[in-house]
Amino acid sequence: MNSFGLKFRMTTFGESHGKAIGCIVDGVPAGLAVDQEYIQSELDRRKPGQSDLTTARKEGDNVEILSGLFEGKSTGTPIALVIFNQDQKSRDYNNVKDLFRPGHADFSYWNKYGIRDYRGGGRSSARETAARVAAGAIAKLLLRELGIKVEAGITEVDGIESESYDFEFALKSRLKALDPAKEAEQIAAVTNAKKNHDSVGGAVLVRATGVPVGLGEPIYHKLDAQLANAMMGINAAKAVEIGDGIEACRLKGSQNNDAITKGGFASNHSGGILGGISNGDTVIAKVWFKPTPSIFQEQTTLNTDGEEIQYQLQGRHDPCVAIRGVVVCEAMMALVLADMALLNMGAKMEYLQKVYGV
């Protein structure tokens, strides 16, 4: 499937080394001010080649809006966005066209479809996430009108955990680190892995503030379930936690329950979600990314003839994919919340009566 969402729906297209990638965003209410400069600024946060901590591939990721806007506002019709690829260097992948790279989708794609685009992984490449960021930027503009803000940062790299969270600092950090005291150590871990032709994993903490009570559609379209679905759909994501996540299983019920007071919840172990519905507190998720499988060490694999061979990868790759995953996590949370906000409009008769003036 290449589409995500029910009411606020994104469909992406394109491959890593194709002519272009892009998306169609459907369900955007008419009259939303769509700031193309803001969409571009979000893409600029994700684009490659910005530092020695990411891939050296140089892509401007310049977005063009083809439809769905008139005089800067959404018309209620599908918004189409396209980003043309500029720096593919497909020749770097000639040595992998007849083999399966360990840790990549090559083996599973080949066996499922009997054909694959070996140039950078084709559709399975993280290059596709640029389209998600573009769609997510539109979702963020919608959420902004509702007083909801989504932000994220790196909370762990190579086992080095953050002890504090500063989302403003993450915006300035080249690692997108949340903890200023841990940034240097985390950067050193990425740099050392790169020097040794290896890679490291990391974790992203993403949160949404200003979320009202009531977003989420039980039983089979819960807010936490769809957030997990959204985050696990990101390339290299291997686990998702909502709120305290696995730490909650180590607590007693008396410790894990969030006491409800007149001033609000006394704690937020639940991550802002109860029964699959937002409870008005900050929505929090943590996304765990595996080490980038593209490493420059000799590895054992099979070729398409089933022969065991040794090979060494060429090309340009991220030593820690979680870094550029930060803005992608934000985009996916924004898409989920925008969808849930529109779905919630039909939850009560009073909402419908208000719209129709009854």
Image (cartoon, rainbow, N blue to C red):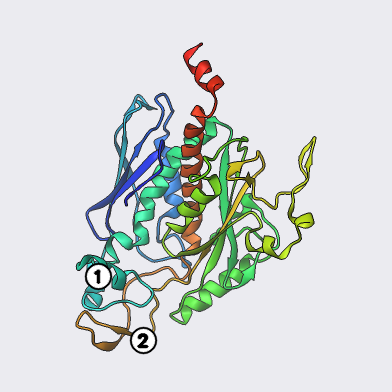
Q: Residue at the far top: name it.
A: 358
Residue 22 x %, y %: 30, 47
Residue 123 x %, y %: 29, 59
Mark toward the start of the polypeptide (2 vs 1): 1
Q: Are marks 2 and 1 in contact (CB under 8 Å)?
A: no
Q: Which mark is residue 132?
A: none
Q: Residue at x 21, y 79 (%)?
A: 304
Q: Quadrant of residue 92?
A: bottom left
Question: Mark 1, residues whose alpha carbon is within 10 Å: few (<14), some, or many (≥20)?
Answer: some
Please name whichever residue, 270 or 134, is drawn nearer the observer in this view of the structure: 270
Please name whichever residue, 305 or 162, is drawn nearer the observer in this view of the structure: 305
Residue 37 x %, y %: 42, 38
Q: Residue at x 48, y 68 (%)?
A: 320
Is residue 263 toward the left or the right of residue 242 in the image? right
Q: Which residue is mark 2?
A: 298
Front disc: 2 or 1: 1
Q: Which residue is mark 1?
A: 110
Q: Residue at x 47, y 34 (%)?
A: 343
Please name whichever residue, 249 or 288, is drawn nearer the observer in this view of the structure: 249
Please name whichever residue, 58 or 251, is drawn nearer the observer in this view of the structure: 251
